[in-house]
Image: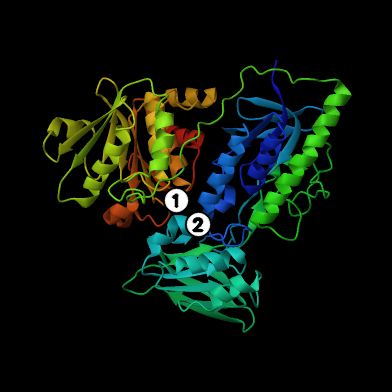
Amino acid sequence: MQKIYDLIIIGGGCAGLSAGIYAGRAKLNTLLIERDHPGGQTSNTNEIANYPGVRKITGPQLMQEMQSQMQDFAVSIVQNDIQMVDFSGDVKRLYTADAEYNTRAVIIATGATPKKIGFPGEVEFTGKGIGYCATCDGEFFSGLDIFVIGGGYVAAEEAVYLTRYGKTVTIVMRGKDFSCAKSIADRAKEHPKIKVLYNTVVREVQGTDFLEKVVFFNTKEEKEVVYKADLTDKTFGLFVFAGYQPATSIFKDQITLDSAGYIPTDEFMQTNVPGVYAAGDLRSKSLRQIVTAVADGAIAATAAEKYIAQEKERLGIVNSVESVNVTPAKTEIPLAVKGQTSEENPTEFIPAEMKKQLTGLFAALVKDISIVSIYEETDAKSMEMVTFLKEITALSEQITLLLYRKNENPDMEKQIGFTRMPIAAFLNEKNEYVGIKFSGIPGGHEMTSFVLAVYNLAGPGQQIEQSVQAKIEKITKPTKLEVFVSLSCHFCPDVVSAGQKIASIQPLVEAEMIDISLFPELKQKLKIMSVPAMSINGGKIIFGAKKIDEIVDQILQEA
């Protein structure tokens, strides 16, 4: 018999994590299901300074704290994609590609996704000059002119952030003034590197390999303004922050949505269906901020608790039916480590607290593996990789570190396909290369993918859906996946980990993480101005976050 949860929360952003904290404290049997990674849109934010009680923090840091706090109350998380729901009965049913989840109450907290404006060239130049995440892609535009499209809170905040990279930053908005708080707007207006174009829209963008030209139109003066990239720069950046689209399409036949796709609720976050609640940016409301999303989640969980208690009393239920075949919670992996020596000990790369976390995680390792690195004393990054790997391998007897100077072991270099430094390549217990490789120091968010590589090879490993496993087994030709990342990109580790999970299952697949900032010649050759970016067997670059099943489908299409 399928387990019936007290509460399932769909979505792991601010609202979902807040709901999880309150549900866990209420001792509800709660599961949170997240399609990608916990954090939602807040993980895109470099600096948060308006969350009460927290004077300044980055988005990823705040989300990590919320997730850890929720898990302190024994709320489980699974990474899965809800594709269909049935809210018609007392027990609500949620369906993925090959699993079913049952629950007495649901909190919908799927948030919203960035809108595309739709001007000519937007799709064609996404990843080639047009971006939607300043934290992920800002570094690519160092020393170049940058345009920010939008006049809201996010546009103003990200414009200020982008001044650390851009030669100039120009905010382009269709309105006559900012629509966010005056303090945020003034910060952007008064910045010496920022100028603002009011009453202006994008008509089109043009270029060859990268953006070279953008045509603006001033709606007040009714005239075009054309910008062309400097002959020296050759390109420029254009970041779109034009609002969000609620992620509610799968619920449209089950609950009431408004004309824009948002979910109307009462003051208790109740939708028009008993036992179904909504929280966060997908609600019909006037203010969409972290603080309001967190409040929504808390109210929804509290209301759900009362509803669940009434339902159990009505049905005479003392304890829920126990589980069989329930998807296990995703293993908690440290989300990021600074790409520098730790503050506690300036000679160490990994902070002491993270070493403590990793030691506990690595206690689950059951197989021997080796990590190979090739280095040169004159190559600073390869030596930094050596320092990092020495600290990692010291945390578990199951991991052996093999270090070779360049040209010292040609056979090993050939086996792992050595072409660039820094490098870390994984071998199994038979000292055979398993197709998992890092060309770049896995600091920042890539610490997650590195730890998952260890866990998948030497530990129990992440479980995946049976349908995806079957697809991976259908790969019959040698396949090389190259995933290009930046260490500030929180979307990138999911793509890297997905590719490497495929490689850990299918020996015909090799998956390599490449820190594109270390290899500018690749950036220019492959025309990469946004991450995550992926190529299959050196083919066309594929931009954007991809799930494991999407990557497998792409591999099979290329075959």
Which mark sits nearer the N-terminus, 2 or 1? 2
Tag 1: residue type? Cys
Residue 251 in view in this figure: yes
For the point 64% across and 82% down, the residue is 220
For the point 42% across and 41% down, the residue is 353
* Nearer the observer, 109 or 556: 109
* Nearer the observer, 459 or 393: 393
Where is mark 1, residue-wise?
489
Q: Check the image and report above or below for 328 versus 413.
A: above
For this view, does 222 lie left or right of residue 191? right
Q: Secondary structure at mark 1?
A: loop
CB under 8 Å between discs 2 and 1: yes
Task: Classify mark 2: residues with Cα within 10 Å, few (<14), some (14-19) or many (20+).
Answer: many
Q: Secondary structure at mark 2?
A: loop
Please name the colour scheme applied to the rendered image: rainbow
For this view, does 534 lie left or right of residue 73? left
Task: Classify mark 1: residues with Cα within 10 Å, few (<14), some (14-19) or many (20+).
Answer: many
Q: In the displayed image of the protein, which residue is found farthest to the right?
A: 314
Q: Position of residue 125 (x, y in %)?
A: 46, 59
Where is mark 2, residue-wise?
133
